[in-house]
Image (tube, rainbow, N blue to C red):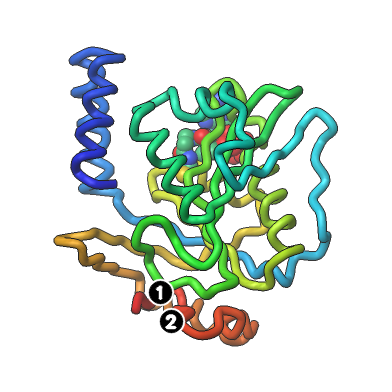
Amino acid sequence: MSISSSLSRLTVYFKRHGFRATVRRFGLAARRTLFSSRMILFYCDLRALSAPTADLPSSLKVERHTNQATLSPQDLQEITSFWNPQQARRNVKERFELGASLWLIKSKDELAGYGWTLQGRTVEPHYFRLGPDDVHLFDFHVFAQYRGRGMNPSLVSYILRSLAAESHGRAFIEAAEWNQAQLASLRRTPFRRLGSARKCTIFGRTIVCSDQNQAAKHKRELKNQSIATTGGKGAGVPGLRA
Ligand SMILES: CC(C)(COP(=O)(O)OP(=O)(O)OC[C@H]1O[C@@H](n2cnc3c(N)ncnc32)[C@H](O)[C@@H]1OP(=O)(O)O)[C@@H](O)C(=O)NCCC(=O)NCCS
């Protein structure tokens, strides 16, 4: 996230929650940046997924949107209103323009959460290059009243199986090491841990530091499974940013 969008997010937080809560939130963000900024990277070989479609409990429904026009104003409002609405709406527009899909999970027709996917590239500089068939999953969110009910694993698993029907590449997702809820949630999906890494962008250049031992181990694993070949020209091997 850029400095300007972090500042604008902080300003919105201040307006909504006041000075004391903002200082606490800022302290938490600073501690996370300084002491637990590592990201845990996960991958899934889409070809290896057995069932072509994912079953969902009858009360749940998943919708995929590839442009903003099909999104109801109410869903758009819910997705963008809980932090910085202006920035969130800009993100939605930018992501659709890049070709991303927005997946909504609904419980009894009420929006419970969402997540994004983008094939062949990432919105922000990533830890490694994706191949044309690879898909990045990012920005997953379950609204507070629906948390702890398996919404996120249901949505992620559904997305992976849907993607497997149309792509033979790999899927990637990452979670901050402090985000125990997301880490616990991903353990209930077909995603497997790939390694860990940190990145920072300075003057437009992204620097990645990965756990080299893990990267080498997983590079071997991916090669053995011939997953790396599906990336084709330009595909990077996780752990090594080109
Ligand atoms: C991370 C997140 C998507 C998980 O969604 P979920 O549908 O609640 O996932 P699960 O039902 O699998 O629960 C995962 C973990 O959340 C935690 N959890 C359970 N109930 C919870 C609640 N009411 N509130 C917060 N966290 C809760 C638990 O640690 C649970 O793991 P456990 O069952 O092994 O104890 C959701 O917490 C969220 O939207 N968080 C804020 C945004 C975020 O961090 N997104 C991920 C990074 S992009």
Of 199 and 233, which appears nearest the observer?
233
* Side (left or right) of 41 relative to 72: left
Q: Residue at x 44, y 23 (%)?
A: 81
Q: Which mark is residue 216?
A: 2
Label 1 environment density (alpha carbons within 10 Å; few <14, some 14–19, many ≥20): many
Let me know if residue 180 appears in the view.
no
Q: Residue at x 64, y 48 (%)?
A: 156
Residue 239 circle label? 1
Cα distance between the residues tagged 2 and 1? 7 Å
Any mark on residue 155, and which?
Answer: none
Height in image: 182 above or below 217? above
Q: Quadrant of residue 145?
A: top right
The x, y position of residue 169, in whole percent, is 63, 72
Residues at circles 2 and 1 in contact by the CB criterion of under 8 Å:
yes
Q: Residue at x 42, y 76 (%)?
A: 215
* Relative side of 38 to 55, left or right: left
Residue closest to the far left: 203
Numbered disc 1: secondary structure: loop
Earlier in the chain: of badge 2 and badge 1, it is 2
Answer yes or no: is residue 145 visible.
Answer: yes
Residue type, numbered disc 2: Ala
Q: Quadrant of the C terminus?
A: bottom left
